[in-house]
Amino acid sequence: MLLAIESSCDESACSIFDTSKIKYNKTLDELIVDEVISSQVNLHKEFGGVVPELASREHIKNLPFIVQVILYKNKIKFSDLTKIAVTSGPGLKGCLLVGVSYAKGLAFSLNKPLVGINHLEAHILSAFSNLKLNEINEFLPALALLVSGGHTQLIKINKIGQYQILANTTDDAAGEAFDKIGTLLGFSYPAGKSVSEAAKIGKALHKLPMPVQGDYNSFSFSGLKTSAALYIKKSALELNTKEKREVFVNDFSASLEQIIVESLISKTEYHLSQDNYKSLILSGGVAANSVLRKRVCDISSKYSLNCLIPRPELCTDNASMVGICALLRSNFIENNSINTSLEVKTRWNVDEVANL
Ligand code: KG4
Ligand code: ZN
């Protein structure tokens, strides 16, 4: 049994995989025995964002508890665990330290192998969850659009463990744009999901500027944030009834969603046209957005590519993606050497992941 742990931001999560089933040629999803997530969203809501020190303290309280729960619920003993995987970066330092220290202690006491997983690689590889382990190479090379609260990147995956960043975040990430502009519309943190719900009711009638398009190697959403803030402030003067405000919030959400999605899609299409790929991957928290999911499937069909998008629960932070990443790094599964000297890396690009 593999225990996977995630604590890089505001979710404490653990997941258990039955590694004995690998030989039966199952999909990665079929190896998942159970997963538990304890979200801190309600705690951070009133501050409008994650408060790192509070987040670390919550992980200290919650992580040992959810591991006990998952083991008890599934009648698994600590001694049944054969491998431990934990997110060791990038993320908030205190939060990573709690997860890594806990995982180290567990691995040391059980005398079992431990591996540190890159959170971004885990997001990307979660897109393979419904594929069989021996099929995955047929889906490569792939282009991955990784869109989370902290990152907006286009990454070429040559093979598992070998990544090339083609376009990167220069300021606010796509998720951050949803969150910050959504907060100005009156939604609580994290606002991405609420914006996408409101957008379903609204019409994209408001004209917002397209984020910088010329530079295909970077993503920038801070200009959009400034324009949106000014637009909302100006419009507020005319919104003198509850009904008018509601219509504005829904229509503005639809406009915002459309502009963010189209700016992501146009850069993705540019990079698809520059190289040969077998698949297009969408992952990270913003990949839970249904309009973006549909547009990514549309352009996958246009370029005759496999479209790989994790199920919505695997898009936002979770521990199953950490386990999937560990399982896909076959060296880790075959290697039984015990090494509990793992350090956290608050900054860690996906093209810097060494072989595990
Ligand atoms: O990957 P993730 O869970 O955490 C990070 O690693 O950052 O991503 C969280 C981000 C937040 O910005 C959240 O607002 C956004 O994903 N998000 C969404 C949706 N669901 C979550 N953004 C747009 N539409 C959604 N449905
Ligand atoms: Zn994440």
Image (spheres, grey):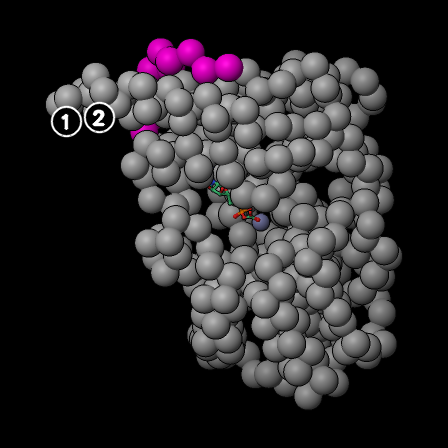
Q: Which residue shows up at 63% across the image and 85% down it? A: 79
User: Label 2 sits on what residue type?
Assistant: Glu
* Res 161 visible: yes
Quadrant location, the C terminus: bottom right
State the CA–CA distance, disc 1 to disc 2: 6 Å
Query: Does residue 76 lie above or below 18 as drawn?
Result: below
Q: Would residue 234 appear left or right of 344 to someone viewing this image?
A: left
Q: Which residue shows up at 61% across the image and 77% down it? A: 102
Query: What range is drawn magenta here?
Result: 198-209
Q: Is residue 202 magenta?
A: yes
Q: Position of residue 186 (x, y in %)?
A: 30, 36
Q: Which residue shows up at 46% across the image and 59% down it? A: 51
Q: Which residue shows up at 60% across the image and 24% down it? A: 264
Q: Which residue is more in the foreground, 270 or 208?
A: 208
Residue at the outermost bottom position? 109
Q: Main secondary structure of the magenta part?
A: loop
Question: Cβ–Cβ below 8 Å for labels 1 and 2?
Answer: yes
Q: Would residue 318 appear left or right of 152 to someone viewing this image?
A: left
Secondary structure state at the residue bearing disc 1: helix
User: Label 1 sits on what residue type?
Assistant: Lys
Local crowd at mark 2 within 10 Å, few (<14), some, or many (≥20)?
some
Asked which quadrant contains residue 219, the reply is top right
Question: Which residue is identified by label 1?
Answer: 242
Asked which quadrant contains residue 297, the reply is top right
Q: Which residue is more in the foreground, 176 or 111?
A: 176
Question: Which residue is identified by label 2?
Answer: 246
